[in-house]
Amino acid sequence: MRAPFVLLSCLLLAGCWQSTGSLFGDAKPVQPFRAGKLVGSNSEKPAEIARSVLTIGKDGSYRLAYTDKEYLGDAMVLRFLALPGLPANIYVFEAVSDDACKPGQTCHPMTAKSERDYGLVRVTKTGAEVFNPDCAKSGAVAKLPGVKADDYGSCTFGNRASLEKALLDLAKQGWKTSVTYRYE
């Protein structure tokens, strides 16, 4: 089971931007958030919340581990990247599922080739707002070099240059909050 909100909301809110393996492998992550307990909510269903703990790794990445009984063991590793040209307090996120193995499920531990999801995150006074972009097959993003669009609103990026261009263009659009996280 993939962790809720950042990853699951890609599917619920019409799509994702993704890659096989990291397209930012050599980029140094930034740490715009402090470690702590979080409450997350999906903008489509704000009454439905999930609790989690955010920790910071030695390599500068974060781990968001869910603490609610329903999602216990589900986690994701996050990297936040400062892309030149983005507005202040907005960063690229790269998320990869790193769930605990549960009885009766096939385990897929995080590897260098694991699927990554991308979008934008905005720092707020109380936490963060996440913008998970979708990808229309006929849209401009789907026509970028190295991008494959599917029928479900997801785009798979094959190169960093196209992803960076798409993220910078996305930041110029009106902000659409997909998920909100606030510190407890």
Image (cartoon, rainbow, N blue to C red):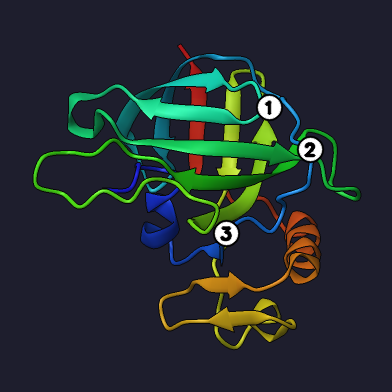
Which residue ends up furthest to the right in the rendered image? 85
> Considering the numbered disc 2 on the image, is that residue within a helix, a strand or a loop?
loop
Q: Is residue 60 above or below residue 150?
A: above
Label 3 and label 1: CA atoms lie apart by: 18 Å
| Residues at discs 3 and 2 in contact (Cβ within 8 Å) | no
Label 1 and label 2: CA atoms lie apart by: 8 Å
Label located before the other in sequence (3 or 1):
3
State the residue position of label 2. Answer: 28
Categorize mark 1 by other alpha carbons within 10 Å: few (<14), some (14-19), many (20+): few
Categorize mark 2 by other alpha carbons within 10 Å: few (<14), some (14-19), many (20+): some
Looking at the rendering, which quadrant does residue 53 occupy?
top left
> Considering the numbered disc 1 on the image, is that residue within a helix, a strand or a loop?
loop
Judging depth in this view, the residue of 106 and 62 nearest the camera is: 106
Label 3 and label 2: CA atoms lie apart by: 16 Å
> Would residue 128 be seen by someone viewing this image from the given angle?
yes
Q: Is residue 166 above or below residue 79?
A: below
| Residues at discs 1 and 2 in contact (Cβ within 8 Å) | yes
Looking at the rendering, which quadrant does residue 134 occupy?
bottom right
Residue 154 pos. (x, y %): 49, 71
State the residue position of label 1. Answer: 60
Q: Is residue 161 above or below residue 109?
A: below
Looking at the rendering, which quadrant does residue 80 occupy?
top right
Q: Amino acid at mark 3?
A: Gly
Q: Amino acid at mark 2?
A: Lys
Horizontal side of 172 relative to 113 (left or right) equals right
State the residue position of label 3. Answer: 21
Residue 127 pos. (x, y %): 59, 23
Q: Which mark is residue 149?
A: none
